[in-house]
Amino acid sequence: MKTHFSYDDEIEQAQCGTWLGGFSSTSSDWAQVDCGACLKQKAKIIAIHNTEEAAIVAQMGDMADFMRNQPQEDDR
Ligand SMILES: [Zn+2]
């Protein structure tokens, strides 16, 4: 039984592309991951995750700016 890397326990496909059945487990702790494909892609998986997080943070920033620029009820 291999442990694949995943940020989410509920997913059906590991980060390396392996479809997870009852025989595989996932972990978000790299120390517990023993799947070669996952480990090989470790740098890429982390990079993608960081990019996604940055995009989410940027999006939330845009949203905050948008809300701030909306005319307030009190200003009318
Ligand atoms: Zn894997």
Image (cartoon, rainbow, N blue to C red):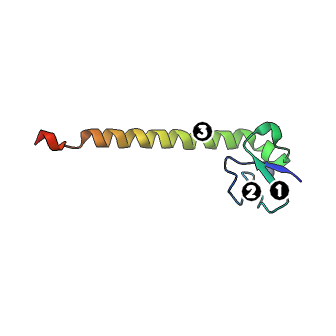
Which quadrant, please, contains the N terminus? bottom right
Cβ of mark 2 under 8 A from ligand 1: yes
- Identify the element where label 2 is drawn: loop
- At horizontal 81% and vertical 43% (from top left) the residue drawn is 33
**In the image shown, does 47 or 63 lie closer to the viewer?**
63
Q: Is mark 1 within 8 Å of ligand 1?
A: yes
Sooner in the amino-acid sequence: mark 2 or mark 1: 2
- Mark 3 near mark 1, Cβ–Cβ under 8 Å? no
Inspect the image, locate mark 2, and give the three-letter code of the amino acid beneath it.
Gly
Q: Which residue carries the number 3 mark?
A: 50
Residue at 80% over, 53% down: 25
Residue at disc 3, secondary structure = helix
Q: Distance between the residues labelled 2 and 1?
A: 13 Å
> Which residue lies under the disc numbered 1?
24
Callouts 2 and 1 close, C-beta under 8 Å: no
Q: Residue 60's x, y, as percent?
A: 42, 42
